[in-house]
C-alpha cells in the first residue's frame, strides 16, 4: 500500500520524479498549482508526485483530526513532536521512492521537496535513504530529527536547498536557519534562501526552485 497521491505527468515519458510533501492540515492539492508556475521547458520529463498525509488527531490543535505527517505536542522553539509518526511517514516516502525505481526512474533523478511539516519528513526521508537521490529542498520548515537521525552516507553529497520567509509567524525563521546550520554541522553542502514573506511560497522562490530543478534534472 502507498500513500494516496496526485501525479502530474510530463508531456513526454518521465525520466525523473519530484516527490513534494505538503504541510499540516493541507493536502497534495496544496502545491498542484505551483507545478505549472515552475515554467519548466516543454521537454522536461519530470513527474510530480504530491502525496496526501493521513488524517490524525493533532494535539496542538485540541486533538482535532486533520491531515498530518505526525502529531505535534507543543509549538515551542523545539517543536515537541511524535517522532515515531515522523519516522513512519519517512518510511512511506521511501515506499514512494521505491515505486519510482520500479517504474524505471533512476534514484539519482528523484528529488524530495517538503513544505513546513512535510519538510521535516523530507529531511529525514532523503537523508536516510539507502540509494543516492537527486536532491532535497526544505520549504518554510525545520529539521525535527537533527539530533537523532542516522544519515545514510550514500547521500552525503546530495544537493540541498533551504528556503524560508523572514516574516513567517508559524515556523519562525530561526528554525529554518537552525535546520540549515544542523545540515552544515552534519557535513552537508546546503544553500539558504530567505524571502520577505510569511508561511507561504513566493514567485521569487518558485523561480529559484525551477532553476535548481532544471540544473539537477535537465
Image: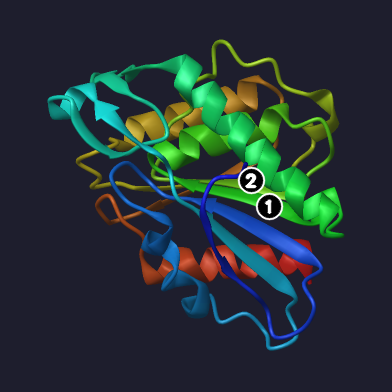
Q: Residue at x 39, y 71 (%)?
A: 203
Q: Quadrant of the N terminus?
A: top right
Q: Give residue 199's position: percent from left, percent from top.
A: 27, 50
In the drawing, what numbered circle is on residue 111? 1
Position of 24 relative to 8 (above/below): above
Q: Give residue 114's position: percent from left, percent from top.
A: 50, 46
State the CA–CA distance, disc 2 to disc 1: 6 Å
Q: Residue at x 82, y 59 (%)?
A: 103
Relative depth, front residue between 81 and 28: 28
Q: Residue at x 53, y 32 (%)?
A: 89
Q: Is residue 18 left or right of residue 216?
A: left
Q: Is residue 67 left or right of residue 96?
A: left
Res 115 seen here: yes
Q: Secondary structure at mark 2?
A: strand
Q: Give residue 102's position: percent from left, percent from top.
A: 84, 52
Disc 2 target residue: 136
Q: Is residue 214 left or right of residue 59?
A: right
Q: Is residue 164 left or right of residue 10?
A: left
| Chosen colour scheme | rainbow
Q: Residue furthest front?
A: 1
Amino acid at each position: 500500500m502507498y500513500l494516496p497521491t496526485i501525479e502530474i505527468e510530463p508531456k513526454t515519458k518521465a525520466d525523473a520524479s519530484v516527490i513534494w510533501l505538503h504541510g499540516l492540515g493541507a493536502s497534495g492539492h496544496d502545491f498542484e498549482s505551483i507545478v505549472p508556475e515552475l515554467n519548466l521547458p516543454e521537454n522536461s520529463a519530470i513527474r510530480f508526485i504530491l502525496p496526501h498525509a493521513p488524517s490524525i488527531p493533532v494535539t496542538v490543535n485540541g486533538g482535532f483530526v486533520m491531515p498530518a505527517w505526525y502529531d505535534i505536542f507543543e509549538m515551542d522553539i523545539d517543536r515537541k513532536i511524535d517522532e515515531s509518526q515522523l519516522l513512519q511517514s519517512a518510511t512511506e516516502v521511501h515506499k514512494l521512492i521505491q515505486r519510482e525505481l520500479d517504474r524505471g526512474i533512476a534514484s539519482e533523478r528523484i528529488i524530495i521537496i517538503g513544505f513546513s511539516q512535510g519538510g521535516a519528513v523530507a529531511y529525514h526521508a532523503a537523508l536516510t535513504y539507502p540509494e543516492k537521490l537527486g536532491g532535497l529542498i526544505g520549504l518554510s520548515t525545520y529539521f525535527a530529527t537533527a539530533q537523532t537521525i542516522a544519515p545514510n552516507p550514500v547521500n552525503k553529497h546530495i544537493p540541498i536547498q533551504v528556503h524560508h520567509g523572514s516574516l513567517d509567524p508559524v515556523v519562525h525563521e530561526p528554525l529554518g536557519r537552525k535546520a540549515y546550520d544542523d545540515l552544515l554541522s552534519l557535513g552537508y553542502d546546503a544553500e539558504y534562501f530567505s524571502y520577505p514573506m510569511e508561511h507561504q511560497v513566493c514567485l521569487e522562490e518558485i523561480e529559484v526552485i525551477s532553476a535548481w530543478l532544471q540544473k539537477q534534472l535537465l
